[in-house]
Image: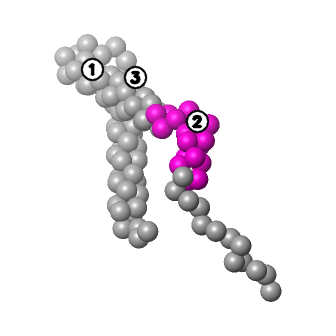
Amino acid sequence: MSNISGISGASTAELLKQKDKIEKASGGGDAFAKHLTSALNEVNELQVDSEKAIGDLATGQVTDLHQAALAINKAEVSMKLMLEIRNKALSAYKELGRTQL
């Protein structure tokens, strides 16, 4: 039979030290925010390209119909992906809110 009475819980100060070490190792808490901002900017650029392609189609200025269709589809797929990521993040946030400490 093993003796587990020697195990103690982590203090708040120890947890904060570990959190600081992890943030320093991963580049801080801003790494996720920077990556998310970059992804949002990319989705926005694809949306702008799609709107330009739609405008070119409407005015008859399109030179390559295939490229216009690709730009529109890329924007649609990227927006759907971003919405799914948002839904998963909201779901995780709600789940954390229901978690009892």
Return the residue at label 2: 24
Return the residue at label 3: 67
Residue 97 shows in the view: yes
Q: Nearer the viewer, residue 3 or 19?
A: 3
Disc sitting over residue 52 in the figure:
1
Q: Is residue 97 above or below residue 5?
A: above
Residue at 58% across, 53% down: 14
Q: CA distance from mark 3 to mark 2?
A: 44 Å
Question: What secondary structure is found at the residue carrying circle 2?
Answer: helix
Residue at 48% across, 38% down: 29
Nearer the observer, disc 3 or disc 1? 1
Q: Which of marks 2 and 1 precedes in the sequence?
A: 2
Magenta range: 14-31
Q: Nearer the viewer, residue 99 or 55?
A: 99
Amino acid under disc 3: Gln
Question: What secondary structure is found at the residue carrying circle 3?
Answer: helix
Q: Is residue 10 above or below residue 75?
A: below
